Image: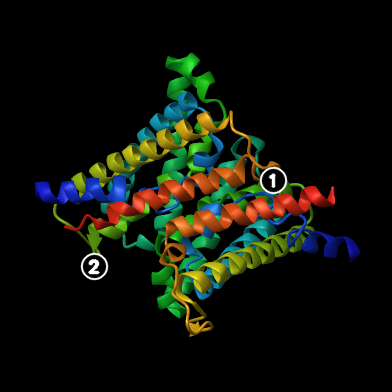
Amino acid sequence: MKKLFQEFIKGIIRENPTFVLALGLCPTLAVSVSVSNGIGMGIAATFVLLGSSMIISLIKKFIPDKVRIPCYIVVIATFVTIAELCMKAYSPVLDRALGIYVPLIVVNCMVLGRAEAFACKNSVAASFFDGLGMGVGFTLALLLISAIRELLGTGKIFGHTLIGSFEPVFVFAGPPGALLVIGLLLGFFNYLKRRKA
Amino acid sequence: MNLQEFLTIFISSVFIYNVILSRFLGLCSFIAISKETKPALAMSGAVMFVIVMSSVITWFVYRFLLMPLELTYLRTISFILVIATSVQLVEMVIRKTNPQMYRAFGIYLPLITVNCAVLGVAVLNIDMFFINGKAVAGSFYYSLFQGICVGIGYTLAMLLMSGIRERLEFCKVPESFKEFPLAFIIAAILSLSFMGFNGFKF
């Protein structure tokens, strides 16, 4: 049980997929315009990660080594399609806001990376907790980036005004803001890591 | 189908909505392979070729397979399979005909499959040129042209970035900002200058 908890907790800080492993950055940058978009994307990616990690660790013995990547991609694409259809049905507003970035979870290197690096070598339970930890870490990272961007770009969080007399910096709501925020955050986390060492 | 439409596609996919700097597709390869100009250009060529090829193939798959059979919800799965297969095919052809080039590309050739720009353009073509379940007139040519333009946009961003990073090699940067963080900040400044193209309106 303690080992499983370790698998879960490592994805949140020590091996955070966004800030430490630098995986799956395309959707992180594209959808982090507002906190609600960020959370939506985080949940969708966590669902795909959980499902695909479990299925891949279940069928790892039947997959020939040479064609493993296409097999992984098919499993991942299945879960992405499920997530896509559910989002279209239950939350059309979010689906429109995320646009092409929902089907693009298929090519998110974080998902394929976990399949290749973890799920194909470990048990179902361990893969489940690894996927959950990575998913939560990804969602928290998205939350942090989107909170910074929404606050600076529009002066609001979840659409509620937080700072009254504040001229929003529109650049932060646009593409350059995303790149700048993630660049500075990566630098900051590097600094923390170096100071610890 | 008219000339102005093509011009709009060109300006918007090369400058206004540049794949990398505005849509954030293919960011991994952009950050990883932009340290020197030569590999960056080779990579851009390969990516452009795969994007154009996959936008043609996925158009046919969607129009003549998924639409008549009413399987459009299988879009994601079928597209990624088609892309993976065609990348594998390209890899085999290059290995047989030009082993030197094959060695130069190395690991990056198979990795194009998971380059989000490729799948992104395929999905974007369908979203833009199939309205209400029907193909727009000339959608095939639009898809093909959009594929080419996105490839040009990718090459442009790669070229700019690798040129800047080559010069940065000789600069003193803070230890914590070496490599990735700095690359992102440069990309932010590049993206800021591309925002100026937003003024183009048609």
Classify mark 1: helix, strand or loop: helix
Q: Residue at (78%, 63%) from the top-left corner?
A: A8
- Seen in the picture, residue A194 relative to B91 is either above or below; the reply is below
Label 1 lies in what chain?
B
Residue B39 visible in the displayed image: yes
Out of A107 and A36, give the one closest to the viewer: A36
Q: Is residue A85 left or right of residue B139?
A: right
Q: Is residue B171 left or right of residue B51?
A: right
- Seen in the picture, residue A2 relative to B1 is either above or below; the reply is below
- Label number found at residue B132: 2
Out of A152 and A125, give the one closest to the viewer: A152
Q: Is residue A148 left or right of residue A85?
A: right
**Disc 2 vs disc 1: which is toward the camera?**
1
Residue B68 visible in the displayed image: no
The amino acid type of the residue labelled 1 equals Ser
The crowd level at tag 2 (other Cα within 10 Å; few <14, some 14-19, many 20+) is: few
x then y, percent, for residue A159: 47, 82
x then y, percent, for residue A14: 77, 56
Label 2 lies in what chain?
B
Q: Quadrant of residue A169?
A: bottom left
Marks 2/1: CA–CA distance: 50 Å
Q: Residue at (36%, 54%) from the top-left corner?
A: B123
Residue lying at the far right of the rendered structure: A2
- Seen in the picture, residue B80 relative to A141 is either above or below; the reply is above
Q: Residue at (60%, 69%) from the top-left corner?
A: A143
The crowd level at tag 1 (other Cα within 10 Å; few <14, some 14-19, many 20+) is: some
Say how many tags the image has.
2
x then y, percent, for residue B45: 39, 30
Q: Quadrant of residue A139?
A: bottom right
Out of A89 and A23, give the one closest to the viewer: A23
The amino acid type of the residue labelled 2 equals Asn
Q: Which residue is mark 1?
A: B176
